Image (cartoon, helix red, strand yellow):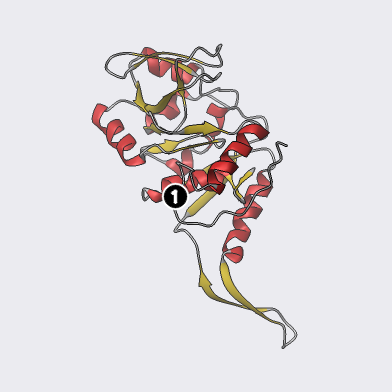
Amino acid sequence: MIEIGGMPILWHIMKEYSFFGHHEFIICAGYRQEYIKEWFANYFLHNSDVSFDFRHGKNEMTIHESHLEPWKVTIADTGYNTMTGGRIKRIQPYVGNETFFMTYGDGVCDVDIDKLLDFHRSHGKTATLTAVKMKQEKGVLDIGGDNAVKSFREKSIADGAPINAGYMVLEPAVFDLLDGDDCVFERKPLETLANEGQLMSYIHEGFWQCMDNIREKNMLEKLLLEDKAPWKRWERSVPNIPDYSK
């Protein structure tokens, strides 16, 4: 819920998918999940023209016009200490037997979601992840000439190898690899998929940036303020954000 340009980074990620026509979201919430629920509960009110009439001794509210995205948002309390794989497993009843997108809530990207989905459908494997080349300590990938992920390792020394940027497309068969709240998605499940030839990479050469610290937050704020944010595909004024790095 940390804000960029006055809106939570979660909202920015959802706007990316919504631009490509994907309007249904499931949020795997845990710590302070009540804040996420309250934010969305108030989203309609804060983005509508309303009249409050107290003249008859009661609160009569009239909605005149709303300025909202056509979203359906399910916020699932997936537990306080649940690991990443366990969180995905807990939302299986909401996903059902459909292909679904999955990404992390701390990074923005300008990947073409339509092309990502087309690539996933073209190879027929269980999972596709978006890979970028950056010198960071993220999930490191060994990618073959056919774009198949040969191996997966998490949190290794930064070496410039392709990393897992999230923005995944998954088949429901992936739920069979998730075995409880202690399951770390980036370990056994992805390693198993890689070993079985069921994990493919969509190489993204554009923009991707996570927000793990105040320096990265300020950089994303600056890109928005200067109207240079690659992930912003919608029209919206951005407030002047103070530079807290000084």
| In this view, 72 is above or below 184 | below
Q: Is residue 1 visible?
A: no
| In this view, 208 is above or below 9 | above
Seen as rendered, the residue at the extreme bottom is 56
> Residue 215 occupies which quadrant of the picture?
top right
Q: Is residue 205 visible?
A: yes
Viewer-nearest residue: 222 or 155:
222
Identified at 49% across, 25% down, the residue is 178
Q: Is residue 165 left or right of residue 123?
A: right
Residue 104: % across, % down = 52, 34
Residue 164: % across, % down = 46, 24
Q: What's under tag 1, amino acid-wise?
A: Glu
Identified at 51% across, 69% down, the residue is 66
> Label 1 crowding class (10 Å Cα cut-off): few <14, some 14-19, many 20+?
few
In the rendered image, which residue does mark 1 sit on? 24
Viewer-nearest residue: 118 or 12:
12
Which quarter of the image is occupied by the C terminus?
top right
| In this view, 223 is above or below 210 | below
| In this view, 125 is above or below 48 | above
Identified at 44% across, 59% down, the residue is 70
Helix, strand or loop at label 1? It is strand
Seen as rendered, the residue at the extreme right is 57
Identified at 60% across, 23% down, the residue is 182
- Numbered disc total: 1
Q: Is residue 241 left or right of residue 172?
A: right
Which quarter of the image is occupied by the N terminus?
top right
Residue 224: % across, % down = 54, 46
Viewer-nearest residue: 218 or 106:
218
Residue 197: % across, % down = 33, 16
